[in-house]
Amino acid sequence: MIFQENGLKVLFDGWEMLNIAILGSGKIGIDLLCKVIKSKYLTCKLVAGRNLKSEGLLFAKKKGFDVSDKGIDTIIEIKDNIDLVFDATSAADHIGHWEILKKNNINVIDMTPSNIGHPIIPTINLDDALVNKNINMVSCGGQSSIPLIHTARKILGNNIKYIELVSSIASISAGPATRINIDEYITNTALAIKKFSGNKINKVILILNPAEPPIFMQTTLSFLLEDDNINLKYLTRNLYSAIDLVKEYLPGYELAFDPKIIEKRLVIMIKVIGNGDYLPEFSGNLDIINAAAIKVAEHISKNKI
């Protein structure tokens, strides 16, 4: 149960909700806003962008939220009322934003592939969000693949020689920031795979598919194995357990088919259907990183002292 008290949303047990601001009014920023609206643990104090006539800021204003076209400057003006900022701009912009936020002691969840903050995959290292001031959500491909890569690595260990990740998304779901950040996306995703799997050799590929009607996000993982004589049934059971954990915040996350061994390659294909909060269901690529970020923010809120 949530009620209003002096203009502040408060949980039934008396805990104040985490006050957040959203920096960036594109597809990711406004979908985050829709998810914050649904959250029992978060409340939005500001949506900051660059153009008051943009679709995103007009949407936020219509929903009754404070908006600004002054970007991060407005966030700093109200910093005493902000616990956490979602930076939904670009990797290049986040570099400057972080310097300002750090100086003003404001925590941030970075939605860009800037590789500045501490990478978080909610099903693996969620508690790390409690002790890091800059949290990086890696990328949509990272959020869709790393829970299963991490699981496969725990079971197969050094039997994995090489990991290849190919994500295919609907071209229409890739906005300007996504397109600007493609090089950073590939680099940051590859670095995160290395961090969470221990595998030094990997390759990341992103395909923007212009097909109509738009395709759902699909991520294919290919593991080159030293020895393909593995207990595939045991591995599959563990992969489904990992999928169930992701489904807690994104129900449309699933295997397209059971894992297969093809000529010393373990092949896993993931299909991601979005929640449809603001973005179409085919925008699972944006939805999975946003749903993961909300999971992180809510965890911070639940543990707020």
Image (spheres, grey):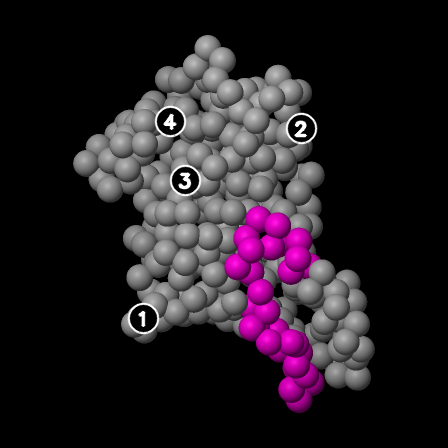
Report, in whole angstroms, how far the alpha carbon at label 1 lies from the one at label 4. 35 Å
Image quadrant holding the C terminus, namely top right
The residue identified by callout 2 is 303
Q: Earlier in the sequence, mark 4 or mark 3?
A: 3
Q: Position of residue 285 (x, y in %)?
A: 45, 58
Instruction: Measure how far apart labels 4 and 2 are at the Cα level.
Output: 22 Å
Mark 2–mark 3 distance (CA, rounded to whole Å)? 23 Å
x, y percent for residue 302: 64, 30
Q: Quadrant of residue 66?
A: top left
Where is mark 4, residue-wise? 46
Label 2 sits on a secondary structure element that is loop
Question: What range of the chain is rendered magenta?
Answer: 242-270
Asked if residue 244 lies in the magenta stretch, the reply is yes
Viewer-nearest of discs 4 and 3:
3
Q: Is 91 above or below relative to 235?
A: above
CA–CA distance in space, label 3 to label 1: 25 Å
Mark found first going from the N terminus, 1 or 4? 4
Which residue has dot 3 on it?
Answer: 34
